[in-house]
Image (cartoon, rainbow, N blue to C red):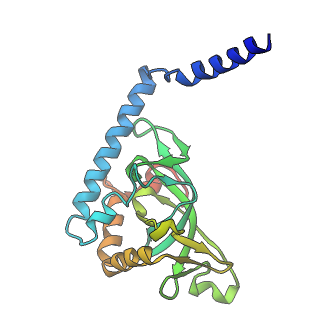
Amino acid sequence: MLGSLLCFKVRSKTDSTALTPPVKTGNAANAEVTAAGRAKENVKRRRTIFGKLKCLSTVAEAGVGSDSVFENGSYGFVSSGSKIVLARVITMYSKSGGKAGAHSIAHRSESISALSYLFGQTYEHGFRRQFKNTRRSDLALGAINRFAHLPSNSFQALLPTEENNKASAKVFPNHVEIGRRAYDLCEGLMAEKGPVCKGVTSLNTVRRKGQKNISLLEDDGVAE
């Protein structure tokens, strides 16, 4: 009897893991196709807008791919206004369907263009490989952590893996220290900070014929 039960458990486990997920049909399938098309078009836009920059190979797809999956908790560089800052991603979102599609939480992605928004903590560059929790302008107020809700196009580069698989970022009470490879990446972005930030502004602007242009956040009705 015990042997039969064990066989049943093994067989059940094998059978359940072998099941293929159901094929999406109807609205679900259409939403998936639309989202994939939007991601492909967004990659094309990034390549066009950043096309003349030396850091194109970095910012075109932000270093995100099948070998460098983007996950909650990942660190990377983002464009925030006229600055490039370090960010730790806390939550990311993807959008299904067309313009009226819903945004849902995503836990991982192999494409930055498949995401819609990011929420994370930002760190301002301090000295060399150190990025501070508190901005210089806020020092008089004490230790203040900064957070930002940004369109995914604001994300410019995922921190690369360091030699010997060392952590790409070390967290300290008042700052984060990035690795040497990440710092080389940072220097490349900082050297073209102006054009990079200008390009991000273009990516995040919705152009409306005969009407005032607005930001993606305004177009989606998201409070900044």
User: Which residue is at 39% across, 38% downward?
Assistant: 35
Note whether 47 is above or below 180 in the view shown: above
Residue 204: name its quadrant: bottom left
Q: Quadrant of the C terminus?
A: bottom right
Residue found 32% across the figure and 71% down from its top:
196
Q: Nearer the viewer, residue 98 or 158?
A: 158
Residue 65 on image: x %, y %: 38, 52
State whether residue 130 is above or below residue 89.
below
Residue at image location 41% in from the left, 74% down from the top: 181
Residue 203, percent from left and from top: 33, 59
User: Is residue 191 among what the camera can see?
Assistant: yes
Residue 47 locus on image (x, y percent)? 25, 58
Q: How many marks?
A: 0
Camera sees residue 213: no
Q: Quadrant of residue 171?
A: bottom right
Q: Residue 184, position in %: x, y?
A: 38, 78
